[in-house]
Amino acid sequence: MYYSITLLAFLMTAGINMNESQAVSSVVNHETIKEKKPVQKRKKNIVEINGLRGKHTVQVGQQLRYSTSVHGSVGYSASAYSSNSEALPLVESFIEYDDEERAEMSGGDSATKYFIFDAKKAGTYEIYAEHYFRGDLEDDFTIVITVEE
């Protein structure tokens, strides 16, 4: 209800004609769109990797997951990529907010960002992880990944 009153007040101030029921309907439709997607179970065995432990050995067919904290409104962000996008491709990256209800509020967007890689071919590769603060590189890691048959 708070959102509908706030939205209605905003629209009235902006000179847009909309009654309270239309404003509530807009808010409900907006919230319906943002429903959480059901968590999909992974088909492959996942190995957690981190930059502090620089070497990992996995099997062909396993997935590797690198995760790090991000906080967009403060300026913390991250990226990760592989030295060989065919043998060890980045197949997915996503963010899970620490508090979903506060994620869109000012300062409430602290989260964990996940990077998922598929070990498709035997060999030794590297995953490069970079951490940024307000666009400037703050820290980087090279994680050596040995993929065995």
Image: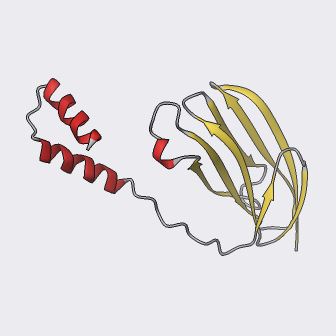
On screen, residue 148 above or below 69: below
Q: Residue at x 33, y 51 (%)?
A: 31
Looking at the picture, tell me which residue is in the foreground, 51 or 118: 51
On screen, residue 116 versus residue 40, left or right, reads right
Q: Residue at x 13, y 42 (%)?
A: 20
Q: Residue at x 90, y 49 (%)?
A: 53
The quarter in which the N terminus is drawn is top left
Looking at the picture, tell me which residue is in the foreground, 110 or 6: 6
List x then y, in percent, for residue 72.
57, 33
Splitting the image into 4 quarters, where does residue 10 fall? top left
Splitting the image into 4 quarters, where does residue 117 fall? bottom right
Looking at the picture, tell me which residue is in the foreground, 144 or 53: 53
List x then y, in percent, for residue 148.
89, 69
List x then y, in percent, for residue 5.
22, 37
Q: How is the image coloured?
A: secondary structure
On screen, residue 2 versus residue 94, left or right, reads left
Count the numbered circles shown. 0
List x then y, in percent, for residue 90.
68, 55
On screen, residue 18 versus residue 113, left or right, reads left
The quarter in which the C terminus is drawn is bottom right
Residue projecting furthest to the front? 1
Q: Residue at x 25, y 34 (%)?
A: 6
Looking at the picture, tell me which residue is in the foreground, 137 or 85: 137
